[in-house]
Image: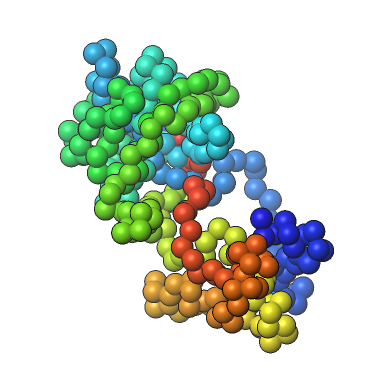
Amino acid sequence: MLIKKRRKHGEVQGPARRESPEKNAVEKTAWRPGNVLSPAPALLVSCGGTPEWKPNLLTVAWAGNVCSDPPLLSISVRPERYSYAIIEATGEFVVNVPSLREARAVDWCGVVSGREADKFAATGLTPAPALQVLAPIVRECPLNIECRVRQSLPLGSHVLFLAEVVAVQVSTALIDAQGKLCLEKAGLLAFAHGEYFTLGRRLGHFGYSVRKQKVDQVKGGQAAEKGPAVQAGRSISPRDAGQRTARSLIPSRPVPSPASRRGAGGAAGHEFRRRKPRSAGPYSRPKR
Ligand SMILES: Cc1cc2nc3c(=O)[nH]c(=O)nc-3n(C[C@H](O)[C@H](O)[C@H](O)COP(=O)(O)O)c2cc1C
């Protein structure tokens, strides 16, 4: 909205890097084509829970949101997985978004098959009823996304299940007094090139680059020194990396008058206003 308004008046400037071209130079080497897209989520997918199929868990990293309305996501599963037959037969599964506490279980469920073990019993994770599907949710995971398969698409090594989100369960411990979902408290996991990570420092909210641009415009050349370009390149001490918030990294800006706030579509006055977070795939070991 804000950015559209500015475009209309020809004012939009990108967050250009202000370092010299030599400093910007990044040397590259060519790799063979592969699944290097990172980070990917590390997810626990639960399935089964019908009279024919016992509940099972499978770790999935080749996954992602694919459509907002209707809410659709995809997971890609190799047909040789025990879970593949379950999902194919039942047309249902739950994507459980794990936290740091479930990291070991996530890895374990990704190397052991449900043909050999009861993964719920072995990991100590708790199967709990889902709202809309027969597959159980994993109670310990902060987010449970219940899915019904719309389409399965054989792609090669994997079959992509395109599924509709039919219900979502969220840990109440992550919801603050204002009703905001505080996912930063969850210690979410990411998977990048064969390794697990937790999400780190919060850098800003959706659209924050546009806000900083406004700071540059308001303060002119002086603020340019503190703009996004310099921050991106600046080194941050280990202490800061863990503790600094976006607020302390973004230069403070003058509080605009109510009139100027209205003039900028109401958006100018809430640089640090907490917004409803927007929801913003796979694993990198080549032969998994
Ligand atoms: C981090 C990680 C990510 C994985 N991602 C996928 C994936 O996206 N698709 C897949 O078919 N297998 C994936 N796997 C492998 C399966 O989780 C693994 O083969 C599992 O044991 C299958 O369980 P099941 O036979 O009980 O279904 C992944 C494993 C790990 C550790």
Image quarter where ligand 1 lies: top left
- Please state if 139 lies on the left or on the right of 256 as rendered: left
- Could you tell me if residue 224 is visible in this image? no
Residue at 67 percent of width and 66 percent of height:
264
The quarter of the rendered structure image containing the C terminus is: top left
Q: Position of residue 133 (x, y in %)?
A: 33, 24
* Vertical placement of residue 136 versus 198, above or below: above
Residue at 47 percent of width and 32 percent of height:
75
Q: Residue farthest to the bottom?
A: 222
Q: Position of residue 115 (x, y in %)?
A: 27, 22
Q: Position of residue 132 (x, y in %)?
A: 34, 26
Residue 270 occupies quadrant:
bottom right
- Could you tell me if residue 130 is visible in this image? yes
* Vertical placement of residue 97 versus 246, above or below: above
* Vertical placement of residue 86 versus 144, above or below: above
Q: Residue farthest to the front?
A: 259
- Please state if 79 lies on the left or on the right of 178 as rendered: right
Residue at 43 percent of width and 51 percent of height:
190
- Please state if 217 lies on the left or on the right of 180 as rendered: right
Q: Position of residue 61 (x, y in %)?
A: 45, 40
Q: Count the numbered circles shown.
A: 0
In the image, 93 versus 223, the foreground residue is 223
The quarter of the rendered structure image containing the N terminus is: bottom right
In the image, 239 versus 79, the foreground residue is 239
Residue at 39 percent of width and 74 percent of height:
243
